[in-house]
């Protein structure tokens, strides 16, 4: 059953096995706050084992677009659609959060975003490929992020 992410009272529930669980929980809450404020969308997550379609879609897009294979175990995931865009999120044990923003209309914006929870190292599979910009968040501390534009079609 999906769990609503509370950005008022941040909890590491579901992320406890991460060495940066508190920071990853803050990062997850930061995303929840963004979607609530911008789209009035309630951000929910479920265990990755129950969201295999989402995890598989993100894994496939990373592999097909950039030959990227994430070494960390996925802990939680979610998929939802807002304003004609499908968003997929996967939160990994390492502290990595990956989101896929996929505009459903032909020619709309499509990109993959990477966010690193405070306290984690840049994953080896991303370190030589991307530069990470820093941003401050009251919920998540310092978030490092990067992205790439999706070129192919991924309708799954």
Image: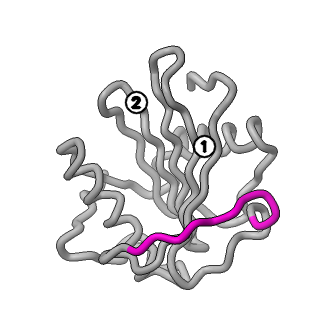
Query: In the rendered image, which residue does mark 1 sit on?
Result: 58
> Which quadrant of the structure image shows residue 83?
top left
Q: How far apart, in angstroms, are the residues tagged by discs 2 and 1?
A: 15 Å
Q: Using a 10 Å C-alpha cutoff, classify the residue at mark 1 as few (fewer than 14 neighbours), some (14 to 19) or many (20 or more).
A: many
Give whichever of 131, 78 is nearer the camera: 131
Q: Secondary structure at mark 1?
A: helix
Say if residue 141 shows up in the picture: yes
- Who's the residue at 53% across and 61% down the image? 97
- Who's the residue at 56% across and 63% down the image? 145
- Who's the residue at 56% across and 26% down the image? 156
> Which quadrant of the structure image shows residue 130?
bottom right
Residue range (magenta) = 127-136
- In this picture, is 31 found above or below 121? above
- In this picture, is 73 found above or below 38? below
- Who's the residue at 32% across and 75% down the image? 139
Residue 75 among those drawn in magenta: no
Dot placed on the residue nearer the N-terminal end, 2 or 1 = 1
Residue 69 in the image: state x and y as whole percent.
76, 53
Give whichever of 154, 35 is nearer the camera: 35
> Which quadrant of the structure image shows residue 110?
top right
In the rendered structure, find residue 85 and report the number of the disc placed on it.
2
Q: Using a 10 Å C-alpha cutoff, classify the residue at mark 2 as few (fewer than 14 neighbours), some (14 to 19) or many (20 or more).
A: some
Residue 125 in the image: state x and y as whole percent.
78, 62
**In screen coordinates, is 7 left or right of 156?**
left
Say if residue 1 shows up in the picture: no
Question: Disc 2 vs disc 1: which is toward the camera?
Answer: 2
**In screen coordinates, is 124 left or right of 147?**
right
């Amino acid at each position: 059953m999906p769990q609503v992410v509370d950005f008022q009272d941040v909890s590491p529930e579901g992320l406890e096995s991460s060495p940066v669980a508190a920071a990853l929980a803050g990062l997850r809450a930061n995303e929840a706050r963004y979607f609530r404020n911008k789209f009035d969308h309630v951000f929910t997550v479920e265990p990755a084992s129950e969201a295999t379609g989402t995890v598989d879609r993100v894994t496939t897009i990373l592999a097909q677009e950039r030959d990227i294979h994430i070494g960390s175990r996925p802990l939680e995931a979610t998929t939802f659609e807002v304003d004609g865009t499908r968003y997929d999120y996967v939160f990994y044990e390492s502290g990595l959060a990956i989101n896929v923003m996929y505009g459903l209309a032909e020619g709309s914006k499509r990109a993959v975003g990477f966010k690193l929870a405070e306290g984690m190292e840049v994953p080896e599979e991303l370190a030589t490929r991307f530069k990470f910009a820093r941003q401050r968040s009251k919920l998540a501390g310092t978030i490092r992020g990067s992205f790439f534009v999706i070129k192919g079609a991924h309708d799954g």
